[in-house]
Amino acid sequence: MKLLPALFIMLSTCSIAFAQDSTVLHHKLSRKMKQELALTGPQSRQLQNIETSFRRQAKSIRRNETLSSAEKDAQLHRLQQTHADQVKALLSATQYVQYQQLMAKSQERWQRAQRLQDRQLPGKTTPGKT
């Protein structure tokens, strides 16, 4: 289950990095998933509810200043596992494998965008910086 941390990172940071475009991004990702996974209408709605709930709960945990870093990590890990279990229960085995592949590709794109953004920050554009 190496994709669980990757999935969490992609979903949580995506909502932060693209806050103003989060609705557009979410709908775009939902449409792509619905098409590529051949989701039924009810599956699509349930998956969207699972993803929305996950993002909302993760955001709440990250913003909770009463929790230590270790406690946040533990709660986020449990939330990731619950999320993965819910998605796995919703999708067929084939759909779940495709879902994991889509999430991995999405994370790779996000990481490339982050690296590009980091290079464009002041002080990061000097020769030899990666």
Image (cartoon, rainbow, N blue to C red):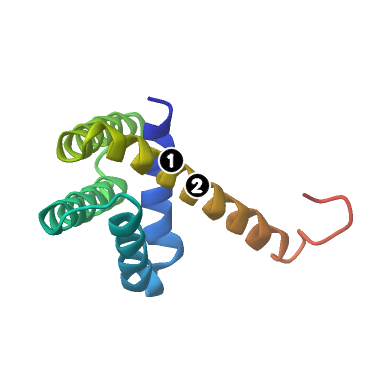
Using residue 77 as the reference point, say whether residue 48 is left or right of it: left
Q: Is residue 62 visible?
A: yes
The label shown at residue 101 is 1
Secondary element type, mark 1: helix
Which residue lies at the image location 65% right of the left edge and 54% below the top edge?
115
Residue 1 rendering spot, x and y as whole percentages? 37, 25
What kind of residue is marked 1?
Gln
Of the pair 42 and 50, the residue shown nearer to us: 42
Secondary element type, mark 2: helix
What kind of residue is marked 2?
Lys
Which residue lies at the image location 69% right of the left edge and 65% below the top edge?
121
Tell me, yes or no, whether the two marked residues, 1 and 2, touch with CB atoms within 8 Å: yes
Which residue lies at the image location 47% right of the left edge and 42% below the top edge?
104
Using residue 98 as the reference point, say whether residue 51 is left or right of it: left
Of the pair 26 and 119, the residue shown nearer to us: 26
Residue 83 rendering spot, x and y as whole percentages? 22, 38
Residue 40 rendering spot, x and y as whole percentages? 16, 54
Specify few, some or many for label 2: CA neighbours under 10 Å numbering under 14, 14-19, or 20 or more.
Answer: few
Q: Is residue 103 above or below residue 120?
A: above
Residue situated furthest top in the rendering: 1
* Number of numbered callouts drawn: 2
The label shown at residue 105 is 2
Q: Quadrant of residue 124?
A: bottom right
